Structure formats: C-alpha cells, structure tokens
C-alpha cells in the first residue's frame, strides 16, 4: 500500500478531526494542515517528503529530539513488560524510581509525588489539594486563589479559572470560580529607567497588600516562575519569586509553582525556582517531564501537606482525585530515560552555550529592526516582540494577524515557527545545533520583514 499524500490526509482529517487551539476554518484556507510522517532529532518530515526544523519543540514538550534512540529503547523495553496498570492499590518500579529521582532533584522539602496525565490536570490537583489542605487543617475560610495578570495555567475549568489570558477565559467566565488577580511583574511593562528587579519589587507591593489584608481567605497564589509562556513569553526577575515566597510564608498562603512549560532546563536551571533559591508548596510539572513522549504530569508537595491528608479512613480526609492512567509505566520509563540524559550528558552546560549562540544570533538579526520593541531571553527561551512603532511600542492590531505571515514563511523555508500574536519565540529541542539555530533566526527575520509590510 502506497504512502498517502499530504493532500489525501488533509481531506480525511478535515472530514472527522477537530484540532486544538484552532479556528478549524483556517485549516481550509489560511493554515493548511501538514500531515507529519516521522521525526528525527530536531526535524519533522511530512508525507510529501518536506522537512521542518522544530523551533518550538512541538508545543514546548520535546527535549532531546524526535525518536531519540535512548528514550525509544527505554519505552520499548517497558512496553514488553508492563504497558499499564491501575495505580490505586498497585504500584510499579518505574513510578517508584521516578518519584525518588524527582524528589532528589526538586527544590528542598518537596518529598511527595502525585502523578496525573496532563499539565491542566496537575494544576487542578494543586488547586484542589491546597483547598482541601486548609479544610483538613480547620481553616474553612481559606477558599480563594490569587493569580497574576497575563498568566496561563491550562484549559480545564479549574486551571482556566486561575489563569487570566482573556482569549482563553472570557467566554467561560460564568463557569469559573472567582479569583483575585494581581499585577504581573512582567519586565516588558517596566517604567523608563526601571530595571527588571525594580519592576518586580514595585509590582510585588500590590501583591503584599492583598496577602496581608485577605490572607485569612486565600488558600494559594499560583505563578509561572520566570516566564509567562502562553502570555506572550513575558519574563520577570527572580527577585519576584524570592519576595513572593517570603510573603506566602508570612501570611500563611500556599505558593503553587507552575513549571509545566519552564521546567526541565528551559530557563537555564533544571527548575526555574532554583534561580531564586525557593521551594514552593506545590510544584507542577508536565510537558518536558517525558521529553515529549507521553502525556504525563506530576505535582510535588512536602510532608506537611501530605500529613494533612494522612488519617483514619473514617475521617474521610483522603485526597480522592484520580485518573485511569496515573503513574503510567511507559510515561515513567520515558521520564527516567530523559533524566538519565540530563545526568550523563551535562545537558545544562551544553544548553548554556546554545542559549548564548541563540541570543547573539537574535541580536544580530533583530537588535536594530525598526519593528522590534524588545528581545528577551531566559535560557533556552527567546522571544522577539514586534510592533508597529519601535519608539512608542504601539502594537499591530490583533485582527491583522501579522503572525500568520511569519508562520507561513517559516513553513515555506522548512522551519516550524508559531508566533504568539505579535511575539516570535524560539524554544528548540536541546539537540539543536548552532547552525540550526542560525537557520531559525534567519527565517524568522525574513518572515518578520514580510509580516510588517503594509497591506
């Protein structure tokens, strides 16, 4: 049987499949679907033989390349023995090993792992766990959550509620719990002459007031450490995390760190919280957890939280959240293989060199561009904010969809770029080469020049 063509697969797809984060009508005209057949390293290949450099790690999940031989072998070996078993009343060695390794690597005090299947599920678990903790501890008024402006934590209802990107949230507001939204320490919005740390300190003052005056009704505050990824890759100074951790301790409020996108080396350290030397009360991980192989997530918490649920059955204090695929052995095998690569290959040191190369290439390409307001970088995440006017930072109207020109040009040149509105970003797999980074940046610059032309 011959391999189907791109066109044939597009037609079959559009007849039955509903894709995520997409207006499906776009796939009939502005953004034709591209059926992928295989991936190797940092490259993807479609059914017509065209290749695409994956500059965004396939939605930020792929760490060590597509079809990595070491991870393939680990998953294949696990597949031969135990693809899955229920995790209620049963356990298995891959999950035990993974929990041991994660708690050894995580910020101090995080000693317990609760497994789930997705980033949104991890957020739901952390939110429920924090709420339930306070109920078990005899503080029934602590039911509210605090979120940062421009934050994104997923799209199930609890996760959506504690985010604040209106594009995703607005239509569902009647279904969502009410949360307290506080200013983001986003350094892009700093005042003239203000440093990112100064901006973080100024914005934190409002948060301190909220925690001081409403702490008796607040269960937790949730934050994406260092980078608000879906919020246009906006970044903040680590000082903010230090201030926030101290305030949460002072006012008896949990700190939930959403490292779903920024964990596992993306920001230059294994976990972003390390750069502020803090330990959150809950650490949510997914995406890179399995290096892009399996849907899996985990929430790490400490013994103090765990002990609030540890009781006689008759007290009905147990945490009853569950998922059929919790602790899936194949996901655990992929995650363990990924952690072994970190351990054996000095990945963070190599990433530091790659990040420096990417930063230098971006400065050459975009540093003086008349439509670039800012180039910002945190480890292996780099973002280019493009605007109508560099001096005033006036943005292009969102309805013009200038980013589509960049996306389409990238595909025509064999590079997968998916800008977030008026922000081009690079978040490549860690196996990328300097030459491939140069190609990404070159193609993005060409795309930007096309995008900013007046119609």
Image (cartoon, rainbow, N blue to C red):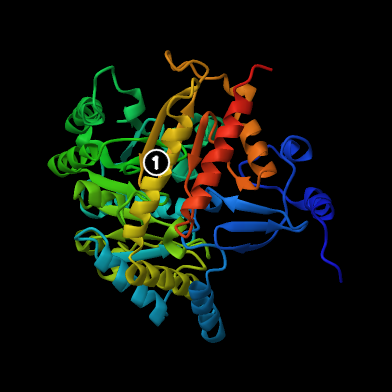
Q: Name above or below for residue 269 compared with residue 441.
A: below
Q: What is the total number of numbered labels drawn onto the structure image?
A: 1
Query: Residue 305's x, y, as percent?
Result: 24, 58
Residue at image location 25% in from the left, 68% down from the top: 104
Residue at image location 68% in from the left, 37% down from the top: 23
Task: Provide the secondary structure element on which disc 1 rests.
Answer: helix
Quadrant of the frame with the N terminus = bottom right
* Closer to the camera in the image, 10 or 124: 10
Query: Residue 146's x, y, as percent?
Result: 32, 36
Residue corresponding to mark 1: 359
412 relative to 235 in the view: left or right = right
Residue at image location 19% in from the left, 61% down from the top: 109
Q: Residue furthest right?
A: 1
44 relative to 48 in the view: left or right = left
Residue 101 seen in the current view: yes
Query: Residue 165's x, y, as percent?
Result: 47, 32
Quadrant of the frame with the C terminus = top right
Q: Residue furthest left?
A: 250
Q: Residue furthest top?
A: 392
Query: Residue 261's x, y, as percent?
Result: 42, 49
> Quadrant of the rendered structure where residue 402 is?
top right
Residue 263 seen in the current view: no
267 relative to 426 in the view: left or right = left
* Closer to the camera in the image, 382 or 222: 382
């Amino acid at each position: 049987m011959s391999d189907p063509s791109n066109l044939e697969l597009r037609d079959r797809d559009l007849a039955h499949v509903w894709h995520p984060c997409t207006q499906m009508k776009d796939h009939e005209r502005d953004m034709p679907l591209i059926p992928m057949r295989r991936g190797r390293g940092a490259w993807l290949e479609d059914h017509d033989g065209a290749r695409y450099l994956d500059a965004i790690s396939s939605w930020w999940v792929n760490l060590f390349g597509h079809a990595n031989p070491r991870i393939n072998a680990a998953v294949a070996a696990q597949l031969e023995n135990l693809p899955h078993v229920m995790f209620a009343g049963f356990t298995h060695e891959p999950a035990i090993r993974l929990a041991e390794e994660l708690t050894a690597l995580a910020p101090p005090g995080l000693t317990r792992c609760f497994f789930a299947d997705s980033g949104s599920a991890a957020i739901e678990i952390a939110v429920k766990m924090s709420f339930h903790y306070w109920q078990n501890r005899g503080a029934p008024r602590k039911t509210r959550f605090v979120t940062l402006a421009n934050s994104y934590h997923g799209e199930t209802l609890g996760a959506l509620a504690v985010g604040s990107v209106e594009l995703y949230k607005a239509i569902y507001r009647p279904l969502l719990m009410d949360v307290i939204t506080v200013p983001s320490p986003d350094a892009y919005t700093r005042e003239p002459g203000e440093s990112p740390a100064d901006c973080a300190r100024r914005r934190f003052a409002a948060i301190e007031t909220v925690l001081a005056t409403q702490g008796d009704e607040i269960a937790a505050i949730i934050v994406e450490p260092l980078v608000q990824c879906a919020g246009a890759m906006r970044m903040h100074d680590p000082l903010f995390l230090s201030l926030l951790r101290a305030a949460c301790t002072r006012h008896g409020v949990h700190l939930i760190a959403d490292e779903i996108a920024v964990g596992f080396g993306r920001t230059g350290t294994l976990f972003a919280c390390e750069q502020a030397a803090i330990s959150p009360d809950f650490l949510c991980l997914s995406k890179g957890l399995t290096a892009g192989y399996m849907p899996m997530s985990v929430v790490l918490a400490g013994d103090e939280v765990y002990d609030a649920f540890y009781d006689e059955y008759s007290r009905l204090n147990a945490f009853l959240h569950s998922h059929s695929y919790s602790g899936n052995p194949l996901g655990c095998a992929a995650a363990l293989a990924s952690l072994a690569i970190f351990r054996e290959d000095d990945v963070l040191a190599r990433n530091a060199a790659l990040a420096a190369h990417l930063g230098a290439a971006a400065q050459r390409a975009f540093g003086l561009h008349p439509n670039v307001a800012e180039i910002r970088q945190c480890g292996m995440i780099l973002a280019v904010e493009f605007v109508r006017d560099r001096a005033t930072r006036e943005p292009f109207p969102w309805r013009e969809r200038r980013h589509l020109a960049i996306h389409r040009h990238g595909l025509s040149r064999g590079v997968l770029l998916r800008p977030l509105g008026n922000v081009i970003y690079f978040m490549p797999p860690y196996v990328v080469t300097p030459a491939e980074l140069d190609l990404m940046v070159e193609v993005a610059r060409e795309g930007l020049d096309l995008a900013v032309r007046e119609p």
